[in-house]
Image: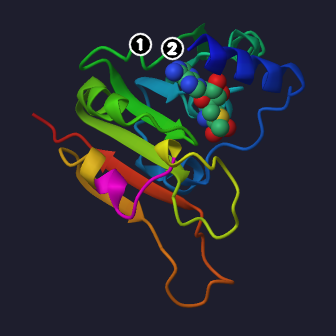
Amino acid sequence: MNDTRDKWNRIYADRTEPGAPATALVRYAHLLPATGDALDVASGLGANARFLADRGLAAQAWDVSDVAITQIRHPGVTASTRDVEANPPAPDSFDVIVVSRFLDRPLCSHLAAALRPGGLLIYQTFVIDKPEGVGPSNPDFLLREGELLELFSGLTVLAFHDEGQVGDMAAGTRDESILVGRRPPN
Ligand SMILES: C[S@@+](CC[C@H](N)C(=O)[O-])C[C@H]1O[C@@H](n2cnc3c(N)ncnc32)[C@H](O)[C@@H]1O
């Protein structure tokens, strides 16, 4: 894990702009609750956490890179250096969890359990058949076709996106899959 942290620390040493929040978070923002606790998992510079805080949620940003985390200073965001693989969130602890461009398969069951009843998961990351070739090349970090549905099979699916390589490949959003899921209310 020190290798991972050191790799990302080197990347964030040269990067200060958080960039845009995940397109899935923006597109499905109307599904967010007005208040509650939200978590941006593997947040990087916290673009998703900042967006969530601006929407009125108490947002936490967790990332293994202390260089990234120390750069996050935004009203309503609490940023913590945390290895989410070693220290996943506790059960029943968040109303909203957002993950973008990060995949650790064993973590997914912890994320589903960390949602409170009625809680919302927004997940967006790269697929193995990514035509533009952006993102990681290691298949450990790439989704198979429909895999988010399997990883979060206990959630109610509100939205799912995985276009594969069907039809006009010059159109559409092909490189990433999106799942918006809700833990069933008690
Ligand atoms: C591709 S970046 C994505 C950052 C941000 N979510 C985004 O969409 O811009 C992947 C992030 O995962 C973080 N990361 C990798 N392994 C991690 C772990 N075990 N625990 C927490 N963060 C981790 C890295 O530090 C990096 O910030």
The quadrant the C terminus occupies is top left
User: What is the secondary structure assignment of the residue under circle 2?
Assistant: loop
Q: Does residue 43 appear in this view?
A: no
The magenta stretch spans residue 7: no
Residue 126 at x, y percent in the picture: 55, 53
Instruction: Write down the residue under mark 2.
Output: 83
Label 1: few (<14), some (14–19) or many (≥20) C-alpha neighbours in 10 Å: few
Task: Say whether mark 1 is within 8 Å of ligand 1.
Answer: yes
Q: Residue at x 40, y 11 (%)?
A: 87
Q: Nearer the viewer, residue 164 or 181?
A: 164
The quadrant the N terminus occupies is top right
Q: Are marks 1 and 2 in contact (CB under 8 Å)?
A: yes
User: What is the secondary structure assignment of the residue under circle 1?
Assistant: loop
Q: Residue at x 72, y 23 (%)?
A: 8
Indicate the amino acid at tag 2: Asp
The numbered dot on residue 86 is 1
Task: Say whether mark 2 is within 8 Å of ligand 1.
Answer: yes
> For the stretch drawn in magenta, what is the main secondary structure?
loop
Q: In the picture shown, does residue 154 fall above or below 67?
A: below
Q: In the picture shown, does residue 128 fall above or below 41?
A: below
Highlighted magenta segment, given as a residue range: 142-149
Q: Residue furthest right?
A: 14
Q: Nearer the viewer, residue 146 or 32?
A: 146
The magenta stretch spans residue 143: yes
Q: Residue at x 45, y 53 (%)?
A: 143
Q: Nearer the viewer, residue 65 or 123?
A: 65
Left or right, 105 with respect to 129, comes to left
